[in-house]
Image (cartoon, rainbow, N blue to C red):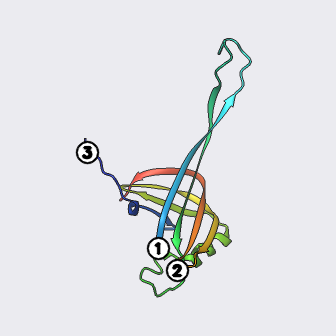
Amino acid sequence: MAYTVYEGKDLRIELDDKTIFHETNATISIEREVETITLDSKDVDPSGDWAKKRVKGMSWGAGGDTMICLDDTTPGAGTAHDFKSLYDAFTAGVEIAVKVAIGGEILSGSAFLQSLSPSAGLDGYGTVSFNLEGSGALTLAPSV
């Protein structure tokens, strides 16, 4: 059976149908909340040694790093998010459409920009880390 291994450049985050300009890192986390059920019955586990679990809910988030770019004359400006447009979306506090391309699949949902963390080293480029908190379901579909 043949498999395709995707490179890091194949995982991209889009916000409101615009890519993150100069994105250098992207992550997505999909989590399931599992809780322990306390049972006071010898019928379920006579030894009392085993914990019973149940699924309570699911959540997701995404994030990444991008170089800080504020110049509208840069190629791709207007079709991609720069620091200013990320900041504007953050301060607006509204849900934004999120798409995460993973090879030939697209994860999509709505999220809030939870944090922006600009930083710059003495000898490097300015970067900003961003985190998104998913709101509602995350769906998986083939990319078109």
Residue lying farthest to the right in this orientation: 40
Q: Helix or strand or loop: what does disc 1 sit on?
A: loop
Label 1 – label 2 distance at C-alpha: 8 Å
Label 3 – label 1 distance at C-alpha: 32 Å
Give amino acid for label 2: Cys
**1 or 2: tag closer to the N-terminus:** 1
Q: Residues within 10 Å of mark 2 (few under 14, many from 20)?
A: some
Give amino acid for label 3: Ala
Q: Quadrant of the C terminus?
A: bottom left
Give amino acid for label 1: His
Q: What percent of the width, then of the height, locates residue 51? A: 65, 24
Q: What percent of the width, then of the height, locates residue 132? A: 59, 60
Residue drawn at 35 percent across, 55 percent down:
6
Residue drawn at 54 percent across, 51 percent down:
29
The answer to the question of whether label 1 and label 2 lie on touching residues, with beta carbons closer than 8 A, is yes
Q: Which mark is residue 69?
A: 2
Judging by the rendered image, the residue that carries numbered circle 3 is 2
**3 or 2: tag closer to the N-terminus:** 3
Would residue 11 appear left or right of 33 to someone viewing this image?
left
Q: Helix or strand or loop: what does disc 2 sit on?
A: loop
Residue drawn at 36 percent across, 58 percent down:
7
Q: Which mark is residue 22?
A: 1
Q: In this orientation, does residue 19 appear?
A: no
In the picture shown, does residue 13 fall above or below 135? Answer: below
The answer to the question of whether label 3 and label 1 lie on touching residues, with beta carbons closer than 8 A, is no
Residue drawn at 53 percent across, 79 percent down:
123
In the picture shown, does residue 140 fall above or below 57? Answer: below
Q: What percent of the width, then of the height, locates residue 61? A: 57, 55
In the picture shown, does residue 64 fall above or below 28? Answer: below
Using the image as rendered, state which of residue 56 and residue 126 is in the foreground.
Answer: 126
